[in-house]
Image (cartoon, helix red, strand yellow):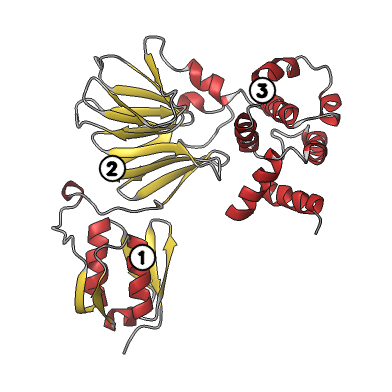
Amino acid sequence: MSNQERFKYLLEVYKENIISVEEHDELFDLISSYGYEKQLGEAVEQDLMFGSDTDMADLPPHIAHEIIRNIYTAEKNTIKVLPSIRRIATIYRWVAAASVIVIVAILSFFYSSSKQNPSAQFAAIIPAYTIETKNTGKEQEVVVLSDGSKVTLAPNSSIHYSRIFSGDSRDIYLEGEAFFQVTKNPMKPFFVYYHNIVTKVLGTSFRVNINAKTGKVEVAVKTGKVQVFENEKMLDFSHKFDKAITIVTPNQKAVYNEQVHVFENGIVEKPEKLLPNDTAVAVKSKFVFDQENLSKVLQQIQTNYGIDIVVENSNLYNCVFTGDVSNLDLFSVLKTICIATNSSFEIDGTKILIKGKGCN
C-alpha cells in the first residue's frame, strides 16, 4: 500500500469513527507533515459537495479542532488567514487550491453555516459581571476561589467566576480543561458550565475536559458525587427530547454524546482507592491474601474502589487467591488475580465483569 493509499484509508476510518488509537496518531502525523494538502483538499471538497444539503458535514466537527492544533504546533499564522476566508465568494474555489489552513477554515465555515458556533454561543451566556482567569503558561495553574475551592487549570484554559459568591449558587464557566476541588456548602451548590453540559456538586473533586481522541466532553469524579446534565441555554431549538442527566460517583466518568443527547457512564482510565468519606464501610488499604476465597477478595477490591465487580460464573467464587498486590493499580491487581484463577475480566459500563469456568 502506497503512502497516498494509506492516507486515504486512514482518513476514511477516521470519518467512520472506527479508527484505532495508533491509526489516529499516524493520520495526524501525516497531516502535520504538510505532504497531503491536495489529497485532503479533494476529500473535503467531496464532503462539501455531497453534504451541502445535510445539517452537518460528513467530517465530524472535532476534526477541524484537531487539525488546528497541528497547525498551531507548526507555528502557522492562522489568525491572519482566517478573516480572508470568510469573505470568499465561492467555497469550492478555495478547496481546489487548499492548504491545510484553508481546509480547516472551510470546515469551520461549512459547519457554522448549519449551526451557531458553539464557542460564540457559550461566550454569550457568560455573565458580564464575572472575572476571568486564564492559564497562559505551559504548566498547570491553581486558582483559589473566594469559598476556598481550588481549580487546577490546564494550559490555555480559563474560568469565569464571581469574585465573591454572594448569590444562592457558586457558578463557574470553564473553557478548556480543569480539575476542581470543591469546598462543601450544601446551602450553596457549585455549578460548572462547560459548553453543552452543567456539573452540579455540593463538595467533591472532579475533572472536566474534552477527550482529544473522541472530541467528546468528559466529567471524571475522584471523590464525592456529581450530577451532570445538559445546559438548556446551549440546546438547539429543534431539540425535542428530555434533558439528559446522570449521576457520577468516584472512579466513574460521564461522556457526553452531543449527537444523540445522552450521557454514557464508564470507568476512569486510572481508578484510585476511595477516601474514607466516600464509603460507609471500613476499608483495608493492604491487599494481602493467603488462600482467600475469591468472593472475599473481589468484595475487598470493590469496597476500596467503589466499582461493582460481578462474576459471569458462580463457580469462580470457589477459587482461592494467595498474594500481596498492595502496590499494584486496580487493573494490574485484576490481571494478577485472573492469571492465578485462569479467568479474565472486561469493563462493562461502570462495572467490571470477571469471566471464566471457575473452580470445583
For the residues bearing labels 3 and 1, Cβ distance under 8 angstroms: no
Q: Which residue is mark 1?
A: 332
Q: Dot 1: few (<14), some (14–19), or many (≥20) neighbours within 10 Å?
A: few
Viewer can see residue 19: no
Dot 1: what SS?
helix
Q: Amino acid at mark 1?
A: Ser
Dot 3: what SS?
helix
Is residue 254 toward the left or the right of residue 316 in the image?
right
Q: CA distance from mark 3 to mark 1?
A: 44 Å
Q: CA distance from mark 1 to mark 2?
A: 26 Å
The circle drawn on residue 78 is 3
Q: Amino acid at mark 3?
A: Thr
Question: Residue extending furthest bottom?
Answer: 360
Is residue 156 toward the left or the right of residue 6 in the image?
left
Q: CA distance from mark 3 to mark 2?
A: 41 Å
Q: Which residue is mark 2?
A: 225
Q: Is residue 329 above or below residue 298?
A: above
Which of 250 and 155 lies nearest the eye of the viewer?
A: 155
* Residue at horizontal 70 percent and vertical 33 percent from the top: 55
Viewer can see residue 79: yes
Q: Dot 3: few (<14), some (14–19), or many (≥20) neighbours within 10 Å?
A: some
Q: Which numbered disc flags the more N-terminal residue, 3 or 1?
A: 3
